[in-house]
Image (tube, rainbow, N blue to C red):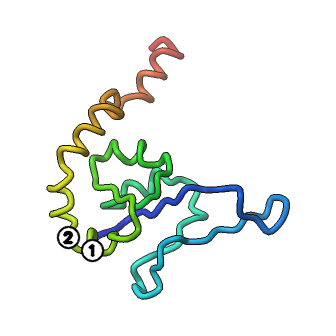
Amino acid sequence: MTGSCFAPTWRDDEFYGSGRYKFTLKLDLYAYQGFDYNASTYHDIARLYLIADVLITEYSSVFFDFANLRRPMLFTTEEIIAALRDLPGMEERYRERYRLFYDKYCGWEKGDASRKVAERVFRL
């Protein structure tokens, strides 16, 4: 079974009152019981990326972080269910576009940034 991470863009233009924001899910998942789990209160989205096979977002900046995993990303709500049913086919169709995006935005990520910072700060 495919695990997905749906990460919508947070917007501050929908609210009940000062500091009390609304959220309207733009993706109708009610017909797919057991398909989605609300992890919006989870403190670290990076950990959710690690267990997700695919990212679903509507142009939130999270796709820059998720792209480092070289996993599929979906951006349109109209075709999400069909794409999830044929994830291998979707990956194949967009393989070159994913590669170009990765090379442009993730090329410097080598998985050793923390070590480099520690070496620089503590002169190890």
From this view, report whether residue 31 is shown above or below residue 77: below
60 w.r.t. 82: above or below: above
- From the top left corner, tell me how far across and down residue 44 is, in percent: 53, 53
Q: How many marks?
A: 2
**Badge 2 amino acid:** Asp
**Quick one: quadrant of the N terminus?**
bottom left
Secondary element at image label 2: loop
Q: Is residue 124 above or below residue 54?
A: above
Q: Which residue is under mark 2?
A: 86
Residue 92 as seen in the image, left or right of residue 59: left
Question: CA separation, marks 1 and 2?
Answer: 6 Å
Residue 39 percent coordinates (x, y): 53, 67
Assign a secondary structure to mark 1.
helix
Q: Are marks 1 and 2 in contact (CB under 8 Å)?
A: yes
Q: Quadrant of residue 47?
A: bottom left
Residue at image position (49%, 46%) is: 61
Residue toward you, 76 or 16? 76
Mark sitting on residue 65: none
Q: Going by the image, does 114 lie left or right of 67?
A: right
Q: Is residue 121 above or below residue 8?
A: above
Residue ID for mark 1: 82
Q: Position of residue 86 (x, y in %)?
A: 20, 70
What is the quadrant of the C terminus in the image?
A: top left
Q: Amino acid at mark 1?
A: Ala
